[in-house]
Structure formats: C-alpha cells, structure tokens
Amino acid sequence: MTPNATDLKFLRRTLEMARELREQGIHPFAALLVDDQGQILMEQGNAYLPDHDMTGHAERVLMTRASTTYSTELLARCTMYTSAEPCAMCAGASYWTGVGRVVYGLSERRLKQITGNHPENPTLDLPCRTVYESGQRQVEVIGPLLEDEAAVVHENFW
C-alpha cells in the first residue's frame, strides 16, 4: 500500500509527540487513533512511567482505551499511526481491537539495532505484518515510513 499526504501528516505528529516525550525523559513512543474522516480521536504516549509498566506501550494503551470507548464498526474504519512499528503485543492489541489500518515510522528491526538489549526495551525483531497475517481478518499495514526521522528520536536515549 502507498501512503498519502494525510498518512505522512499524522505520522509526523507521532514523531513530534515522541520528541516531546523524550525531552521529559519518557520512552519516546507515541500513537494516534484517527477516524476515516481524518479526525484524531485519541493520542497516547508511552506509559512505562511512573510505575515501570513494561506493557505500557503507547499502542497497547491506546488500543485498550479505544476498545472500551468506540464501536468495532468505527474502529474498523480507523487508522492507528505510531512512531515505531507495533511490537507483537501491540500488534495483537490492535488486531483484537479491530483497527483497520496501521501506519508506522521506525521498524522493529531498526529499533532493535538502536536499543540493543536495553532492559527497559528488549525489542523483538518480529514484523507486525507477521502477527496480522496470522489472524483471521485483514489489517492494512503501511511502513516503515520516515524511518530516518523516526530513528533520530531514539538515538542516544537508550
């Protein structure tokens, strides 16, 4: 699939959010839920802090919020934009929530190269497409996009 100008605009918003989180000392990951009319329904940054929640990934928290707020019919028409590729947990959460599209910046493979085996981010090198393809419904995936720009947010953080 090919990204459009709207995809790039919202992806850049996640990168801006990630930079703001980094400046606060928060893991620099961010995600948006956008409806099919181009309205941002929800924004979410990483929620590792303050409780050191290893499952507090921006995408997983966003999907938990979305699944308890919106109908499955609406979510099927939504896109989750995320500064980095959803890990297996986050891809699973978005699959179960029923989001129809995912657009991401930094790939898991490149993130793993940047973070190494950091104890707060033991990155999996498992493409989200593999998770989605294992499911029973289709999820459109676009990414990596703006990967060099997305990588800068993580450099020298981990």
Image (cartoon, grey):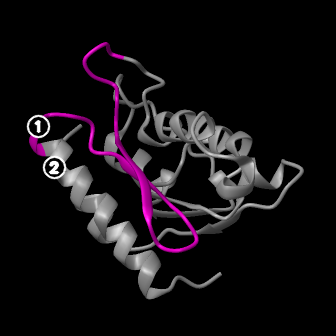
Residue at image position (37%, 38%) is 116
Identity of the residue furthest to the top in this view: 51
Q: Quadrant of residue 124?
A: top right
Q: Which residue is identified by label 2?
A: 20
Q: Position of residue 75 (x, y in %)?
A: 65, 54
* Kind of residue sitting beneath label 2: Glu
Disc 2 is placed on an element classified as helix
Dominant SS of magenta comes to loop
Q: How many marks?
A: 2
Question: Within the magenta stretch, is there residue 40?
Answer: yes
**Is residue 34 in the magenta section?**
yes
Q: Residue at x 64, y 38 (%)?
A: 93
Q: Which residue is mark 1?
A: 24
Q: Between residue 132 and residue 45, name the one nearer to us.
A: 45
Q: Over which residues does the magenta segment extend?
A: 23-52
User: In what quadrant of the picture does the C terminus appear?
Assistant: top left
Q: Are marks 2 and 1 in contact (CB under 8 Å)?
A: yes
Locate residue 63, reporting x and y percent. 56, 40
- What is the three-letter code of the residue carrying label 1? Gln
Residue at the image position 50 percent from the left and 51 percent from the top = 108
Residue 18 lies, with reference to residue 5, above or below; the image says: above
Residue 156 visible somewhere in the drawing: no
Q: Is residue 137 left or right of residue 77?
A: right
Query: Quadrant location of residue 76?
Result: bottom right
Q: Residues within 10 Å of mark 1 (few under 14, many from 20)?
A: few
